[in-house]
Amino acid sequence: MANGLSVDGDAWEDHARWWDAESRRAVEAMDVTPETLTAAQGAFGKLGASTVGAAYAEALQARREAGQRFGAYAQSVAEHIRRDVQGYRDVEADAATTLSS
């Protein structure tokens, strides 16, 4: 391409794979099992179950949801990278075809 402009597709694919992995790590790191939620609610005894325990379980549930949202965001970044790199490759191939005809 003119003036030596090029996109390192392999490097961008590596970056997209990092985002794929980050997506999985975020979900796994922030996940909370139903058993953990039940245990959290009961962790403060019979009297605390409806107050502190409920608030603790709610905070853990919010943590799980945040991990799922970040995981989805990270996956969308990976997809965006791949889509843009493929778009660049398609334009470059079309330009090469146009120039050679």
Image (tube, rainbow, N blue to C red):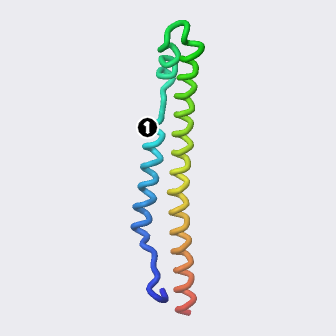
Residue in the foreground of this view, choosing between 57 and 7: 57
Q: Residue furthest right?
A: 50
Q: Which SS class for mark 1? A: helix
Q: Give the total of numbered labels.
A: 1
Q: Quadrant of residue 47?
A: top right
Q: Amino acid at mark 1?
A: Ala
Q: Position of residue 36 (x, y in %)?
A: 47, 22
Eyeballing the image, is 46 above or below 70? above
> Residue drawn at (48%, 17%), measured in percent from left and top?
39
Eyeballing the image, is 2 above or below 35? below
> Residue drawn at (57%, 32%), measured in percent from left and top?
62
> Residue drawn at (44%, 65%), measured in percent from left and top?
12
Residue in the foreground of this view, choosing between 87 and 41: 41
> Residue drawn at (55%, 47%), measured in percent from left and top?
72
Q: Position of residue 91 (x, y in %)?
A: 56, 78
Q: Residue furthest top?
A: 46
Eyeballing the image, is 41 above or below 5? above
Eyeballing the image, is 90 above or below 48? below
Residue in the foreground of this view, choosing between 52 and 92: 52
Q: Position of residue 28 (x, y in %)?
A: 44, 38
Circle 1 packing at 10 Å, graded few (<14), some (14-19), many (20+), is: few
Q: Position of residue 87 (x, y in %)?
A: 56, 71
Circle 1 residue: 29
